[in-house]
Every structure is written in C-alpha cells, then in structure tokens.
C-alpha cells in the first residue's frame, strides 16, 4: 500500500475476508464516503468505519489519502515487529491492535496540529496497553497469550 499511495488520490486497503456488499456496487467511493473531488485538500488522510455495539476491533477497511495516509502507513510499518493479537481461539493472528493504535496516533497528531497543542497533551496512549497481547500463566503453570 505504501508504494502505491503516491499514485492515487485514494487507496482502499481491504482485509482479505472483507468484500463490498452488492447493494453498494452502484455507488461511487467518493459518494459513499461523502467526499467531493473538488475539495481534495479537506479529505481526511485515514478513514475507517466506526465500531458498532458488541463488535470487536475488526474494521476490515482503511481508506488512505495524502500525507496523513502516508504517515499512517509509516507508523503502521514501524510497528511491524510488534506481537500479533491472537484471535479466534488462537487460530487467527490479527494486526488490529497496531492498525488502530496507528490510527489513534495520526488522529491525535492532526488534532494537535489544528489546536496548536503539544502531542502529549492530546494523546496519552491509553489504548496502547490493549494493542500488545499479554502473556499470562495458566493454572497448570503453562504460559498463554
């Protein structure tokens, strides 16, 4: 995604297990996102969907544009050696914690810039402890994620 973003106005990064619904096939991406082509400078750099009540962190889709989108990818790639979350009874490893931590960092940086406030006054990384899996000890003495 990082090498392709400079060549496109928007880049959709979609999980392999996510597919657009047929009902949205007749709607253009800009229209679906509420973006106007003549106002590119006001587009957000990173777009993901909000979580609905009872859902996990899996957004499935990130839409990126401009320098904020590039920064998001840089932050995400910088975390590429972080431990993975274990989901689905240990059968699936996810990057959702690092994806959303990077998203929060970009959102906080943008807010910090707009409000002319230091970054550490905007974002204290409260979610960071949830982004990295914890090792705990089972009753039988074995370790688990």
Image (tube, helix red, strand yellow):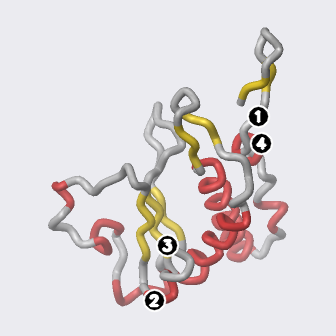
Q: How many labels does the image show?
A: 4
Pointer 4 residue: 129
Q: Which residue is drawn at 76% across and 34% down?
A: 134
Q: Which residue is drawn at 18% across and 63% down?
A: 25
Above or below residue 78? Residue 7 is: below
Q: Disc 3 on helix, strand or loop?
A: strand
Badges 1 and 3: C-beta atoms under 8 Å apart?
no
Pointer 3 residue: 64
> Local crowd at mark 1 within 10 Å, few (<14), some, or many (≥20)?
few
* 48 lies left or right of 136: left
Q: Disc 2 on helix, strand or loop?
A: helix
Pointer 2 residue: 7
Q: Distance between the residues labelled 4 and 1?
A: 9 Å
Q: Distance between the residues labelled 2 and 1?
A: 39 Å
Near-viewer residue (87 or 59): 87
Say whether disc 3 or disc 4 marks the residue closer to the N-terminus.
3
Pointer 1 residue: 134
Above or below residue 53? Residue 2 is: below
């Amino acid at each position: 995604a990082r090498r392709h973003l400079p060549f496109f106005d928007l880049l959709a990064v979609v999980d392999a297990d996510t597919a657009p619904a047929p009902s949205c096939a007749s709607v253009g991406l800009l229209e679906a996102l509420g973006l106007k082509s003549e106002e590119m400078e006001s587009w957000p750099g990173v777009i993901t969907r909000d979580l609905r009540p009872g859902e996990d962190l899996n957004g499935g889709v990130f839409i990126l544009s401009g320098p904020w989108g590039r920064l998001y990818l840089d932050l995400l790639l910088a975390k590429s050696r972080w431990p993975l979350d274990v989901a689905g009874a240990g059968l699936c490893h996810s990057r959702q914690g690092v994806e959303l931590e990077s998203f929060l960092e970009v959102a906080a940086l943008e807010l910090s810039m707009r409000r002319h406030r230091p970054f550490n006054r905007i974002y204290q990384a409260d979610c960071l402890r949830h982004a990295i899996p914890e090792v705990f000890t089972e009753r039988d003495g074995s370790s688990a994620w």
